[in-house]
Image (spheres, rainbow, N blue to C red):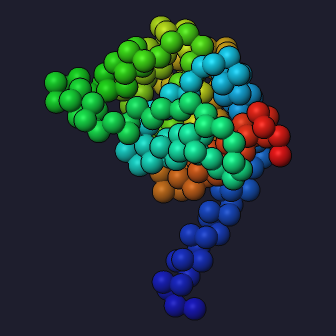
Amino acid sequence: MDTTEQQISQWFATHMEHTAQAATTVAPQIEPAADAFVSTLLQDGKLITCANGNANILAQYFCTALLNRLEQDRPALPAINLGADATTYSAICRDNRFNDTFSRQVRAIGKPGDLLFVVVDDGHKANLIQAIQAAHDREMQVVVLSAREKSDITSLLHPEDHEIALNNLDPAEATPLLLMIINTLCRLVDAKLFGG
């Protein structure tokens, strides 16, 4: 086996190790978060997501799976990704208010009974922290899916909030696991709301 093949094999082996570790460490955190999504939806609330950079792809994927479907046909579920509106995002940044990119939108469209879902793959930026603070100001519950444990965000969470935290992985290692967790959350939501 040449050096490149050895490196590829090592990347796969590392991924499998991280997956096995996550299966035991975060599994107990997943169902309570899914239950929070289900409770919000059953009370006519909506799920609002936000994320920075590549994690925004995961936030959009989550919304797409809810608005359309993951595996089974079922009614659409209300989910909005604040990072999907590039025009609004860039307008807020243009006015030198990067830290307000999400909090401004949460204050405008969030309402009591809604839920903010934050996906974080590379540390906890001020705009995500301000989004959580805005959600709490609007009496919204918060769920955080993070590549890192014991972050600045952890200290902001209220007792009714939920955090699913991987074991301090870098974004390249965390992304496939975050996607797996999002798929698991969506499957649980579908099963709890629609059966199957």
Residue 33 in the image, given as x and y percentages of width and height? 69, 30
- Asked whether the viewer can see residue 40, the reply is yes
In the picture, residue 195 is in which quadrant? top right
Which residue is pictured at 27% across the width and 30% down the height?
88
Q: Residue furthest bottom?
A: 1
Question: On the rendered structure, is 193 left or right of 158?
Answer: right
Residue 89 in the image, given as x and y percentages of width and height? 28, 32
Depth check, front residue: 25 or 36: 36
Depth check, front residue: 142 or 148: 142
Q: Residue furthest left?
A: 95
Which residue is pictured at 16% across the width and 24% down the height?
95
In the picture, residue 160 is in which quadrant? top right
Which residue is pictured at 38% across the width and 15% down the height?
108
Residue 5 in the image, given as x and y percentages of width and height? 54, 84
Which residue is pictured at 65% across the width and 69% down the height?
13
Quarter of the picture holding the N terminus: bottom right
- Numbered-mark total: 0
Depth check, front residue: 125 or 67: 67
Whether 20 is drawn above or below 182: the answer is below
- Asked whether the viewer can see residue 25, the reply is no
Q: Residue furthest right?
A: 196
Whether 161 is drawn above or below 117: the answer is above
Residue 134 in the image, given as x and y percentages of width and height? 44, 14
